[in-house]
Structure formats: structure tokens, C-alpha cells
Amino acid sequence: MKLENGEVIDAKQVISNADVVYTYLKLLNEQDVPSHYRRRVNHYELSCSAIVALFGFKKDSFDLTHHTFIIPKNPDRAYHEIFKTKAVHPDLAAYLCCATRTDDTVAPQGTEGLYVLVPVPGRLKDGSSWEDKRAWTMDFVIAELERRGLHGLKSKLLFQKVFLPSDYEKTFNQPQGMGFGIQPIMRQMGPLRPKTRSPYVEGLYLAGASTNPGCGVPLVISSGRSAAQALLADLGMNGG
């Protein structure tokens, strides 16, 4: 394995928790993976991405619970646009987490933090760049939250930061900025997802949201455990 700085690390076994699509198409040499499987990986249907906004404000500025879901007026249309049309629906769909409502130690004394996740396509159909939409994105999220009941949010903010699909692609090498691994559609679920033990590269084990069993914190943790167990078993050690 060759690092960006030129250092070479020799290893007989490697666990990759980079996304499977990135691992097979970018980290491995083309000749290491059969062409038919590279084509399959290249045509996996990817999950959507997300805008993640972080806000800080004075304690009790808003009547929030720990968990809040914002459902658009026409959810079928909204999610069709996100997943099929590849556009940002003007009526906000979002998950809000105000963890300070149950644990005030997660923010400075006298303040609260709000996490906002908005599902969006990783690639926009009109070809525009998410990076060029950074300022627009924050204005859109704040305006929609104010419309949904967080009145005066913009004027009360002590802290704000936004993460875009382009950030996940650049920082975490997530193909198209996807947020949840390959899409959990019927042909990409459970045992039909990429296997923990690579069938093509000896000594390569895979973990993460795109592997079997799937996305979500418990399943991703399970994939890591499975990768470790497979490696230990191949070394003739107890993988329990």
C-alpha cells in the first residue's frame, strides 16, 4: 500500500473502511479486480447525500425536543425530487436533533446546539456545483426553519456551520457525496451487498455502510466486527 507521501506499507491483510465503491475503483489497481465486477461496482445505485447544518444559540431560545422530524407538505413529491429528479425540493424535509435538551454538557453553559440533517441528491441534475451553493444552502435551511417555527433563528445564532455533499466527497472520499452507502434497494440489500471478505483480492476485508449487512450505526459496527472475525479466522485465530 502506497501513501500520498510516497511511503509504502507492506501488509498481508488489510481492512478497508473506505467505501466499497471507492476501495474497488480508486484504491485498487484496475488489474486487481475482474472487469465484470468493476462494471458492477461502477453501476451500483448510490444513496442520497445530505446537508448537515450545525447551529448554536442561547439556551431556551426555542421550544425544541431532543428529536424532531420536519415532513414536507407533499412528501411523495419531495422525495421523488430528491431521489429521482435530483433536485432540492423547496419545502424542507429534515431531521433535527437538539441533544442539549437531555444533556446540557454537550454545549457551553447557557447555550444549546442544534443538528439539522436535510436529505439532498449528491449530484444535481442541472449540473450546478454544491460548493457554489454554500451560502445559498445556509440561507435556505435557516429560512425554512424559521418558516417552520424557529422564528428569529438567524438573529439568534451564536454559531453556524454547514457540511455539503462536496465536503463528504473531498474529505471522506464518498462517491458523489453519498451519505449512506449504496442504496438499500432490493438488488443491493443484505447478502446482495459487497461481501466482508473480498472474493477477488486475497487479504482484503471490507467494512462500512456499503457492505453486508447495510447502513446505519448498528449495521456498520456489525460490518467492522465481521471484517475482524473474517481476518482472524483466516489467520487461524479465534474470531469470536
Image (cartoon, helix red, strand yellow):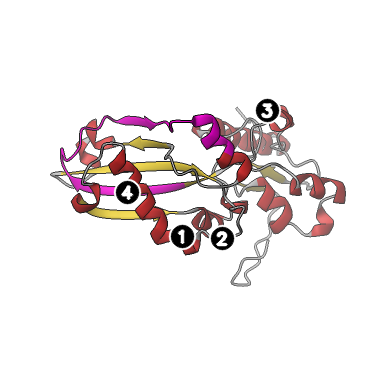
The answer to which of marks 2 and 3 sits earlier in the sequence is 2
Instruction: Say which mark, if any, is on residue 133.
Output: 1
Q: Which residues are magenta?
A: 51-80
Mark 1: few, some, or many residues within 10 Å (few <14, many ≥20)? few
Measuring from the top left, give residue 82's x and y in whole percent: 56, 41
Q: Nearer the viewer, mark 3 or mark 1?
A: 1
Name the amino acid type tagged 2. Answer: Ser
Image quadrant where residue 200 sits: top right
Q: State the residue position of label 3.
A: 190
Marks 1 and 4, how far apart in space? 14 Å
Instruction: Say which mark, if any, is on residue 142.
Output: 4
Quarter of the image where the C terminus is located:
top right
Name the amino acid type tagged 3. Answer: Gly
Mark 3: few, some, or many residues within 10 Å (few <14, many ≥20)? some
Label 3 residue SS: helix
Residue 7 located left or right of residue 90:
right
Q: State the residue position of label 2.
A: 128
Instruction: Tell whether label 2 touches label 4 (CB within 8 Å).
Output: no
Label 1 residue SS: helix
Instruction: Tell whether label 1 touches label 2 (CB within 8 Å).
Output: yes
Q: Is residue 62 magenta?
A: yes
- Residue at screen point 60% across, 69% down: 4
The reply to whether residue 218 is in sight is no
